[in-house]
Amino acid sequence: MQYRLIKKTGDEISPLGFGAMRLPLKNGKIDRQEASKLIYYAIDNGVNLIDTAYLYGDSEKFLGEVLQGEYKDKVRISTKLPTINIRKYEDMEEILDEQLNRLQRDCIDYYLMHAVDLKSLNRLFKKDLLKFIAKAKSEGKIKHVGFSYHGPKEDFPLLVDAFDWDVVMVQYNYFDENVQASMEGIEYAASKGMGIFVMEPLKGGILAGKMPKDAEEIFKKANPNKNTAEWALEWVLNNRNVTCVFSGMNSLEQLNENLAVADRITPLSMSFEDMETVELVKRVMRNSLKINCSTCGYCMPCPQGVNIPECLKIYNEKYLFNHKGFINQSFMNYYQYVGGIMGNSGNAGKCNACGKCLRKCPQKLNIIEELKKVKKEFEIPGSKYALFFVEHVGFPIYRYLVKLINH
């Protein structure tokens, strides 16, 4: 694997990083055996940076437990300060100490301000963020600092210039080339010697796996041996300013595919023909995608229990894959995954327009209005009562019968 240098820090980083937000789950919790196997395999094959965050459930604690011995020294950790949790200066110190305890480390390699825009960063400055950073560095608790960006591209250079940052994390993929930081913003940050970490290279999975028929045909015609995820990852790693791409890999197959791409692709190595192929696919996707949601989950949890990312994802898939007819695949997915049939009731109709999700959305989507579209699309007259029955009567009976059969 050919490593990429961060000029500001002098660190050589693997172009593929392990994103620990979507680790494999079992019964709703991290599957320790499967997740640790993947992480060890990634490190053994050259990955030397793992990204997590305070808000990623038990991710930090899990990493602290499994990254011991030789593996503790082989990998760097990137984690984040939960800016939405900061009310006063002392909160920053308390949370950092808690993170160090979770991770079982004396020092965090890359410490990022989580999901900031211009307004939220200014708020942190007023809470003495710079004093906190200076003190944490002097005490040896953090080595390098940066921020993960979730704002408009016009403001990005202002945040880059606001402090002597070492790194920045941005959403970047061929579909969102000019969203948030944008290609120009990435180039500007790189010109200052900053490391560029990339999140959502596959746009929450939309750019991997099954795609609209027209898009798949374009890719297959160009190279029948390359899958959609490989195309997306190659496109990001082809950018000479990108240091590391974080991918949430939850199977050995995904991990091996991504490792192969990271080994193969060097900056500016994609051919002109391949770049043109991606551009054609992007045009097809733009004509099909209705809601620009990356399913990052920052809008969650919803006070009313709406599974916002899944609702928007299913709605998008209906148009991406041209599901027609009254009872189509998307309709069935909706009632299976958010309609309560499997015990996961989180349908769009539960939204009461409280607005708590709006300020947390990195894409600045009007989630309330988008959920109205989802409800109109999938929730037929009378479905409110049917969904209530399924959730409170049907599924408990089903669960009881399964338990009876297993005994």
Image (cartoon, helix red, strand yellow):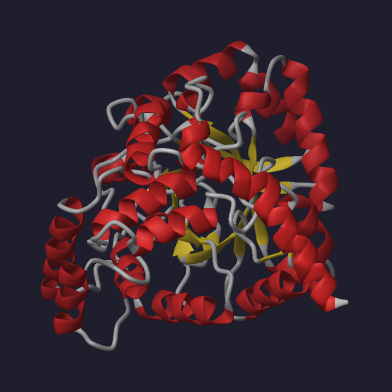
Image position, residue 91 (x, y; %): 76, 22
The one nearer the camera, 352 or 296, is 352
Image position, residue 271 (x, y; %): 16, 75
Image position, residue 157 (x, y; %): 33, 30
Q: Which residue is drawn at 69% across and 16% down?
A: 87
Q: Which residue is drawn at 16% across and 77% down?
A: 217
Residue 32 appears in view: no
Q: Quadrant of the C terminus?
A: bottom right
The one nearer the camera, 180 or 296, is 296
Q: Is residue 275 above or below residue 21?
A: below
Q: Which residue is drawn at 13% across and 56% down?
A: 283
Image position, residue 377 (x, y; %): 32, 43
Q: Is residue 245 above or below residue 99?
A: below
Q: Which residue lies furthest to the right in this view?
A: 407
The one nearer the camera, 22 or 83, is 22
The one nearer the camera, 336 or 11, is 336
Residue 379 appears in view: yes
Q: In this view, does 340 lie above or below 93?
A: below
Q: Residue furthest bottom?
A: 225
Q: Which residue lies furthest to the top in this view?
A: 126
Q: Which residue is drawn at 70% across and 24% down?
A: 132
* Count of numbered circles on the image: 0
* Among the 4 quarters of the image, the one containing residue 93: top right
